[in-house]
Amino acid sequence: MNKEAFEKGLKTRREVLGSEYVDNSIKNAGDFNMPMQELVTEYCWNDIWNRPGLDRRSRSMINLSMLTALNRPHELKLHLKGAINNGLTKDEIREILMQTAIYCGVPAAIDSFRCAKEVFAEMGI
């Protein structure tokens, strides 16, 4: 593990997903899954999210689309919160999910709308 890359990734991960969630993920990691936490933090949150070329809003839009296509509701809910933290509006998220209905299928989009509704209620928006 590259400690510097991990720390930079941890900072970005906290800014996008929230410190409470990230710190709990790290704190609750054991011997079995800590290597995965390190991998995700270093490579995903540093090497990709900190690359120039796309801003965080754009990366969030892409993630919402991909997670809908992959049918990953747990990660989608997490990245819906991240998208809000990255400045996306409820209306923009609706439009992203509408677009996914065409390219990923209506059932996938409906599930994502359900997830978004839960997240918005949780966040009071």
Image (spheres, helix red, strand yellow):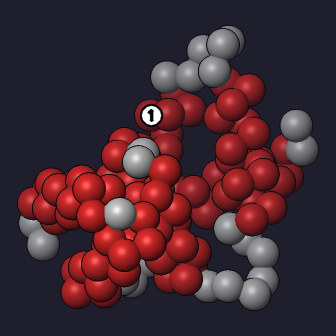
Task: Determine whether 86 is above or below 74 in the image.
Answer: below
The foreground one among 3 and 45 is: 45
The foreground one among 80 and 69 is: 69
| The C terminus - image quarter | bottom left
* Total numbered circles: 1
Q: Is residue 82 visible?
A: no
Q: Residue at x 54, y 73 (%)?
A: 62
Q: Residue lying at the far right in this picture: please name it.
A: 2
Q: Quadrant of residue 1?
A: top right
Question: Within 10 angstroms of label 1, few (less than 14), some, or many (20 or more) residues?
Answer: few
In the image, taking residue 78 as reference, residue 94 lies left or right, namely left
In the image, taking residue 15 as reference, residue 108 lies left or right, namely left
Disc 1 marks a residue whose amino acid type is Asn
Q: Residue at x 50, y 82 (%)?
A: 57
Q: Quadrant of residue 35?
A: top right
Q: Position of residue 121 (x, y in %)?
A: 10, 60
Q: Residue at x 49, y 40 (%)?
A: 23
Task: Determine whether 38 is above or below 59 in the image.
Answer: above
In the image, taking residue 117 as reference, residue 9 lies left or right, namely right
Q: Position of residue 39 (x, y in %)?
A: 75, 39
**Residue that label 1 marks:** 24
Q: Position of residue 111 (x, y in %)?
A: 24, 54
Look at the numbered disc 1 and give the secondary structure of its residue.
helix
Q: Residue at x 63, y 21 (%)?
A: 33
Q: Is residue 71 visible?
A: yes
Q: Position of residue 88 (x, y in %)?
A: 36, 83
